[in-house]
Amino acid sequence: MTTNDMPLTKEMILDAAEQVLRRYGPDKTSVIDIAKVLQVSHGTLYRHFASKASLREAVTERWLQYSIAAPLEEIAGRRDGSPVERLRLWLVTLIHAKRKFAVEDAEMFGMYAAVTVIEVDMIAAHVNRLIRQIAQIIEQGMANREFKPGQSAVHAKAIFLATSRFHHPAHAKEWSLETIDDDFEAVWQLLLTGLA
């Protein structure tokens, strides 16, 4: 498909950028490479994105939303089952997604890891979205008395931080350790003791 046949949209650019990033990796991908896929001049892309950095940020933000946040939002929004089970499922789903992407989608995961250091505001917004999801589950648990009364937002942030070894990209090399699942189980039991 050539963009000469239709108006170029941000979504088309992001699709092409993601394709090229997966092919060449974030360090070797240039705006010119993305423009070639779209069959436009690289200057055309700068009408939509001010810089290569802003384009990378937009690709990463979209990837985080659809690959990480949206599936977790579905879990957080459920009303069936126990909030304890749902909280554990939410954490395990996040952890397994990160592990999977680190191996099976290494280019996008690498770009995400790099962006976590550079684009602090965008990553903070993503993390806050996830913490709100945890808080939603905790509020349900407090409402049905599975969890102790308290400040759901404070508890949610603590849970997110306490489990960061298992999902933050800075710890990706540790995820293949033999003890990693046992380590998570120990942290989970400690968190559950504090909540229940």
Image (spheres, rainbow, N blue to C red):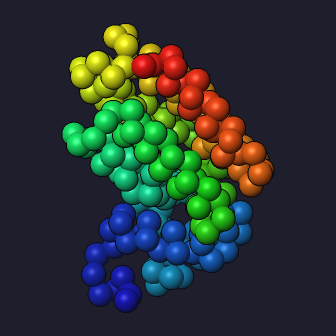
Residue 154 lies, with reference to residue 74, above or below; the image says above
Quadrant of the snapshot with the C terminus: top left
Image coords of residue 92 (percent x, y): 51, 46
- Above or below, 64 against 194 in this view is below
The percent position of residue 106, horizontal first and vertical second, equals 65, 65
- The image shows residue 145, relative to residue 72, as above or below, that is above
Residue 31 location (% of width, % of height): 58, 68
Q: Residue 110 lies in what quarter of the image?
A: bottom right
Q: Residue at x 75, y 45 (%)?
A: 179
Residue sitting farthest toward the top: 150
Left or right of 141 in this view: 66? right
Can residue 129 be seen in this snapshot?
A: no
Q: Locate residue 48: give its quadrant.
A: bottom left
Nearer the observer, 179 or 32: 179
Closer to the camera in the image, 25 or 6: 25
Q: Can residue 96 be seen by looking at this rendering?
A: yes
Q: How many marks?
A: 0
**Is residue 195 or residue 46 the one in the foreground?**
195
Relative to 181, is 147 on the left or the right?
Answer: left
Question: Which residue is rendered at x = 45% and y = 80% of the image?
Answer: 38
Quarter holding the N terminus? Answer: bottom left
Q: Is residue 177 above or below residue 157?
A: below
> Image point 37% across, 40% down: which residue?
86
Q: Residue at x 45, y 19 (%)?
A: 195
